[in-house]
Image (cartoon, helix red, strand yellow):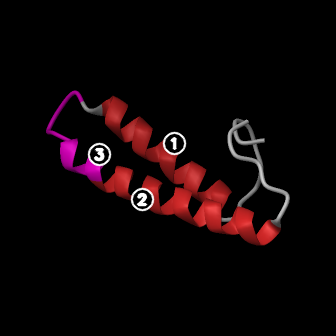
Amino acid sequence: MGLEYTDEKWATRIDNVRIQILEEEIAYYEQLIGPEDCGHIHTTIRFLKERIKHLAGGPREWPFT
């Protein structure tokens, strides 16, 4: 699914770009957190942090298999 590369060096660069973009998104979402009714934002942030761990070489578990 998405961009698939067989060249490991190129794939690592792409993953680094993805990580940078996700970190920027997390920073933006953290600014949106208010005093109440923001559980969906917290859930999104947790999911994106798990995705970053996966891209950085973490375990390949569902849903990132």
The reply to whether residue 57 is in sight is no
The one nearer the camera, 28 or 58, is 28
Disc 3 to disc 1, C-alpha distance:
12 Å
Find residue 44 and report its image quarter: top left
Q: Which residue lies furthest to the left in this view?
A: 35
Q: Residue at x 29, y 45 (%)?
A: 29
Q: How many numbered callouts?
A: 3
Residue 48 is left or right of residue 16, and the answer is left
Q: What stretch is highlighted in magenta?
A: 28-37
The answer to whether the residue labelled 2 contacts the one labelled 1, judged by CB atoms less than 8 Å apart, is: no
| The label number, if any, that marks residue 29 in the structure image | 3
Membership of 36 in magenta stretch? yes
Badge 2 or badge 3: first in the primary sequence: 2
| The label number, if any, that marks residue 47 in the structure image | 1
The answer to whether the residue labelled 3 contacts the one labelled 1, judged by CB atoms less than 8 Å apart, is: no
Secondary structure under badge 2?
helix
Disc 2 to disc 3, C-alpha distance:
10 Å
Secondary structure under badge 3?
helix
The reply to whether residue 51 is in sight is yes
Q: Residue at x 47, y 45 (%)?
A: 46
Q: Which residue is drawn at 76% across and 48% down?
A: 4
Disc 2 to disc 1, C-alpha distance:
12 Å
Q: Residue at x 21, y 42 (%)?
A: 33
Q: Name the residue under label 2.
A: 23
Q: Could you classify mark 2 by the number of other residues whose Cα lies within 10 Å: few (under 14), some (14-19), or many (20 or more)?
A: some
In x, y percent, where is residue 22? 45, 53
**Which amino acid, by three-letter code, is at mark 3?**
Tyr
- Quadrant, the N terminus: top right
